Structure formats: C-alpha cells, structure tokens
Image (tube, grey):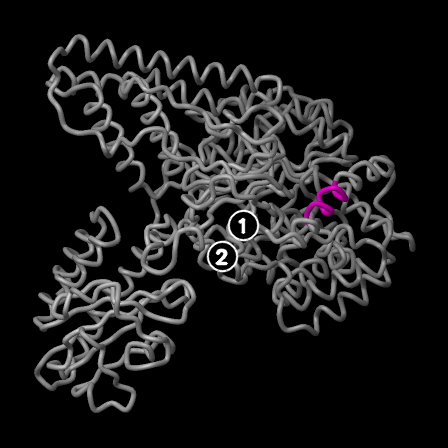
Amino acid sequence: MLKMMRRIVQEVNAAQDLEQALSIIVQRVREALETQSCTVFLMEKDQQHVVLMATEGLNKDVIGKVKVPVGHGLIGLIGQKGELFNLDKASEHPSFIDLEGAGEERFNAFLGVPIIHHRRILGVLVVQQQEARRFDEAEEAFLITMSAQLAGVIANAEASGKVGDICEPADKLIDVTFLDGIPSVPGVGIGHAIVVYPLADLTAVPEKSATDIDAEIQKLNAAIIAVREDIQVMQQRMASSLPDEELAIFDVYLKMLDSHSLSGEITEHIKNGLWAQGALKKVILEHVKQFEEMDDEYLRERVTDIKDIGRRVLMYLQRDKHNLPEYPEQTILIGEEVTAAALVEVPEGKLAGVVSAKGSSNSHVAILARALGVPTVMGVNNIPANQLEGVELIVNGYHGRVYIAPPLALHKEFTLLAQEERQLDEELENIRDLPAETPDNKRLSLYVNTGLVADVERSLSAGAEGVGLYRTEVPFMSRERFPGEEEQRAIYRQLLTVFSPRPVVMRTLDIGGDKMLPYFPIQEENPFLGWRGIRITLDHPEIFTVQLRAMLKASEGLDNLHIMFPMISCLTEADDAILLLQKTYQDLREEGLNITYPKIGVMIEIPSAVTQAGELAKRFDFLSVGSNDLTQYILAVDRNNTRVANLYNALHPAVIRALQEVVMRGHEQGKTVSICGEMAGDPASVVLLLALGFDSLSMSAASLPRVKWVIRNLPLIVAEEALHNALSQVNPQAVRRQLERVLIEHDLGGLIWAGK
C-alpha cells in the first residue's frame, strides 16, 4: 500500500494541470482499493456547493454539471462538517440523496473523506462499491492520505487561477481580500502589482541534438557575456544607493556566470551532442535539484539565484530579449519567486513594495529590499498571480499582510498612515539628541542592532547611544571562506572606531538554525534544536579563538568593546566560553598588545537560560535577552514557518513572565539587563519593557526614534499599571489591544500600525 501511495503521489506531482491530477487520482485510487468507483468533488468559491469534477465509475457526462448544496446529502454533509463517512449501505442513511444522472444507484458501500488545506475544506474524495460492506481502517487511512496530497495540488491550482472555470468566471475570482506572510522589511507600501514571472521556462526546453557544435558553444558564450553585462549594469546602477556588502549580491551572480564548473558542464554536454538550450537546461536543473535537497537554508536560498541565472542565459539563447513591463509610479513586485535582479530592474524611485511566495527574511531579495527601505513580505502562500497584474495592493511590512484591491475606506486609512509615518519621521528628528527618559525620570539607553558597517551612519543619525548587538556572522555569510584574523580585525576596528566612545556589543559567531555559511554546511533534521551558536564555536576553538583575537586586537586604544555569547543553555558552556576568552586575552597581552579586558555578556534565548539567569548573572557583566529566539523556543513555534507563524507572538503571557524573571534575577546580582530583537522595536511592547525594568533596548535604526518617542511621553507609573493588567490576560491579542489603548490615551496612537 505504501509503495502504491508513493507511486500515485509521484504521478500526481508530475501532472501537467489540475484536470490531469484529478484524473490520475480517481484512476489510481480505484485500482489501489479495488473498488468500482472513485470521485472527486470540489468546493465552489462561494462555499455553497460542491461540484463533481472527476470520476472513474460514475457517468463522466455529468462532470462539472452535478452540484450538491453544502449540508445536503452525504457529499454536502462531508463538505460542511469536514468529517469522514464510512457506510455499508449509503442509500439507507437519512441524509442520502441520489445524484441525478451520475449512475450511483447501483453502489452500496460508501467511503467519503474531506479534502482540507489549512483548515479550509476544498472538496470531497469518495470511493463506492456495489458490495454492501464497510471499508476497513487501512482503506480509510489510504483515502485520507490521498485527500491530503490532493489538497496541496488543489491549493496550488487555486493560487495560479487554474480552477477558475470550475466555479465562477475569471473576473470574479478575487474574493480573498488579503494574503498573509512573514514580515521582512517594515513599512507601508501602496501601489499597483507587477507580477514577476520566470524570464524563460527551462523545463519547457525540448531535447534536441546539436547540428553544429561549435556554433552552439559560440551561442552559449555570447549569451553568458550578455547576461554578465546586464548584471554589471544593474550593479553600477545601484552602486550609489547600496553599500558594498549589499552590492555583493551581484558578485554572487557574476561568480556563477564565471564559474568554470557551470559553463564547463554546459559546454561538455554540447560537445556530447546536445544543443545549447538543452545543455543549459540539463545542468541548471541538476544544480537546482542538488541545492533543493540540502538542509542548509543558506544554500537552499541559492536555488533562486541559480534558476534566475539559467533563465537569463536561456532568454538570450532564445534570441528573445525579455521585454521589461511598464512600471507604474508606485510598483509592487509580486510573484512566486521574486529575485534580487528583478527588484533592481524597477526604475529608481518607483519600487513601493515586494511580495514573494518563496524566500525568507535572509534571502537576497529581502536583504536588498531592506537596504533600500522597501516594505517587504516573504513566504506568502497561494498568491493568485495570474489575477493580480495591475491590481492595487497595500503591503503592510510591519505585520506581514498584503491587501488585494482594497476598498476605498482601507485605502484611505493606509494612505493616511503612510503620510503620518513620513510626518512622524520629520517630527522625530527634533528628539534625536535628547535622552530616552520618561516624564517621571526613568532613563533607558537605546542601542541599535546591526550586522553591516554600512548601517553606522543611519544608526548615529537616529540617535543611537551605541550598538547593542553586532551580528558578526554577517561578514562570514558574505564570503566563500572563513575570514582570517586580520580581515575580521579590520571590520571590527572600523565599527568600534566610528562608534567610539559609545559601547559596541559584539556577539560571537552565531550560525546554525536559519543562518548558514555556504562553505560550512550543517545538515540536521531539526537545525533550530541542533548544532548552533556557542555549541559550534566551542566545538571549533580554532574558529572561535581567531574571532576573539580579532575582536580584542580591534579594541586596542578604544576600550568600547563588549563581547556577548549566544545560545548559552547551561553553566558549563558559559564557563568554557569565558575561559577561552580569558586565555585569548592573556595570550595577546603576552604578545605585547595593550588591550583592556572587555565587559562580557550572555544572551538569554532559551528557557534553560531563563531558569539559570541568576547564576549566569554572577558570571557575566550583563544579560541580554534575544526576544526573537526566546519567543520561538518558549512557544515552540518556528516563526519562519508560515503554517504556524500566526502562533508566534512575543506578547504571550508566558514570554512576558520569562522576561520578568530574567530582569529580576539580573538586578538581584547588580547587573544590567538589555533586550534586543523585534520586541524592543515595537512601540506597544516597549510599554511593557519599560515597566519590566530593562536597562537598555536594542533595535533597528528605523525603530529607534519611535521607541524614544514612546518613552519620553509615557510615565513609568502608567507602564507599570499596563504590565499588571497584561499579566492578568490569557492571550497575546488581548495584551496588544490593552497596550494600544494605553498609547492612544497618551496621544501616541500614530505608532499603532493597522492590518494585524
């Protein structure tokens, strides 16, 4: 049965369209269960009827014509309740109704299961048999498994508009008012959609033999040269807008084009008799398959780049230069897979937002969009791409929501919101150099999170008092090998010098989980609970020591370096890391360097660190809560997984209580406690952080002025009352509503972003 199931799934996944997939399902399921009939019904868009769409065993003349009202008959009941029905004599059930013209009157045994995708009933899968009997548990399990597979196929077909003719005319299909994804770049973008389609379809290239091998190789080389020139033009165009580290994205493309392994493989296939397009297809798809099977998220993200390069080369081989669309003044790029190159092709000043189904907040397009300050939402499921060209969209990058063809009232609300955002930015300039101090004299320090030296100017202009989190893994991720000691020292020295005498907290190398190095692959079934953070660096002291030496050497004469260890889960790890730092410091002193021992801190990111916060505070100079990971681990929610991302919420009462515990234990030992991550930059959450007693907050430079505005206008006593009320709530939504009321009551409502 398992082998049969796998075979069916493979056939369905290889189907050209939904109609073929449904046909395969009904044929193969009927054969597998050795029954006389298998039928698929799909739900209409209005959710009022299910329509017979494929059958083996019933009358095929009624396909698309038989409609069953939801709640009526056995099929309608399954469509309403989402429950399995297993009957030996279906006609004796009180809800049975005969499907006119279907020819089912000869059947007795009936097994029907709902087709469900993300809690939504998409249809019904039914098998029937003349013999009066109940289907056994194995048969039930088989049919349920098939319905789950079919659900994904139908959902994808819906997203691409391929089921429109089943239910309603295509012009009525847009009934989804919004799409949800992962917030990747904050902000509000309003504009009209330009759908990003593949430049050329590699999978459609036919197999052909080369008639002139030399000519085919010349075509390939000319196409590669043309694509290289295109990429260089894009890179030059963005040179004045982006720092070197973001421009390195284009170097990745150029290195792929210059890679002997890639062009060499294609040329080799041509020499073996394939025409250039076929050779390109073979090599690119082989590389795509290899990368897609990797557990390393960073390497999987390279699949997008490989596909994009392949399509661009194919475009020139087909001698059909891609015609760029007419970009509206406010362009929202949206598609299944928006690439960094597609983003750069939008004329300067016209890009208002980016929406992509594939990719994460660490993908190249997200990095580039963040550098340009373009509101972006990634990981959006079921984008109805073929219906969206030219449609007005609102991108809410704060909460990861995209509104489709918004009604006038919503459009006005977000337009006003965007205007207020710009006005607020201007007003906040006036408090840039003022302290983050409440009206009743509670003072906090505001720092920035960064991984790029290029962020320095933006951070200082926002009024940052220092760097609360420097992500040292970013320079590691932008290279194709481990950076040497001197390379690292130069990077760290630049940051320490620019911020001097302000403190700079450098987190030691924090890779693993969703942050991977292309030259240091880690393959694990569950990377977030695996080898990451301090676990890796303690296991590789040769890497750790080089980084510590570079940090300490970079601080000579500046004395503003603070070092912080990530992902500490037990006291032994803490002690081992401290001993290694002390030894490295002593070695450098013996080498004649006049350096000061830095303040050291620990990140509180996992529950075990929360419960040991007091003991950790005895060993370190400061504690720093990593709110993103701590929330993820306390709630057991992968925030990059769109299926459960709605459960990720830092205002969950369990998270608030954990924060309270950390601050309390840290202060008992006389140590400062800070917090970094999205929570620190959220104006509503800041109300709680203020009351909890955090000494400093660290956030993005863009968030800092707004956070300062909250602190300067909200008395501590009001925040403490809000905290007391929050701890009595049972869900994070209630906590947020209460905090937003507090902001509104103190004329801070302009910081509340709509569209949650």
Question: Where the C terminus falls, by quadrant?
Answer: bottom right
Q: Name the element at disc 2.
A: loop
User: Does residue 726 belong to the magenta stretch?
Assistant: no
The number of numbered discs placed on residues in the rendered structure image is: 2
Q: Which numbered dot is residue 456?
A: none
Q: Which residue carries the number 2 mark?
A: 176
Residue type for callout 1? Ile
In contact (CB < 8 Å): disc 1 and disc 2:
yes
Residue at the (53%, 34%) spot, across then down: 367
Residue at left 62%, top 62%? Answer: 655
Q: Which residues are magenta?
A: 414-421
**In front of the other: 657 or 652:** 652
Spatial CA span between label 1 and label 2:
7 Å
Badge 1 density bin: few <14, some 14–19, many ≥20, Cα 10 Å? many
Q: Position of residue 191 (x, y in %)?
A: 59, 39
* Residue 179 locus on image (x, y percent): 51, 53
Residue 691, located in which quarter of the rendered image? bottom right
Tell me where residue 746 sits by quadrant: bottom right
Q: Work out whether residue 270 can be spotted.
A: yes
Q: Check disc 2: other Cα within 10 Å, few if <14, some if 14-19, many if 20+.
A: few
- Residue 714 image point, x, y percent: 85, 55
- Which numbered disc flags the more N-terminal residue, 1 or 2? 2
Q: Is residue 239 left or right of residue 482?
A: right
- Magenta span: helix, strand or loop, mainly? helix
Amino acid type shown at disc 2 = Val
**Rendered position, 337 above or below 216:** below
- Residue labelled with disc 1: 404
For residue 534, say whether it is visible.
Answer: no
Instruction: State left or right for residue 478 relative to residue 137.
Output: right
Residue at figure coordinates x 69%, y 28% from the top left: 456
Q: Quadrant of the N terminus?
A: bottom left
Secondary structure beneath dot 1 equals strand
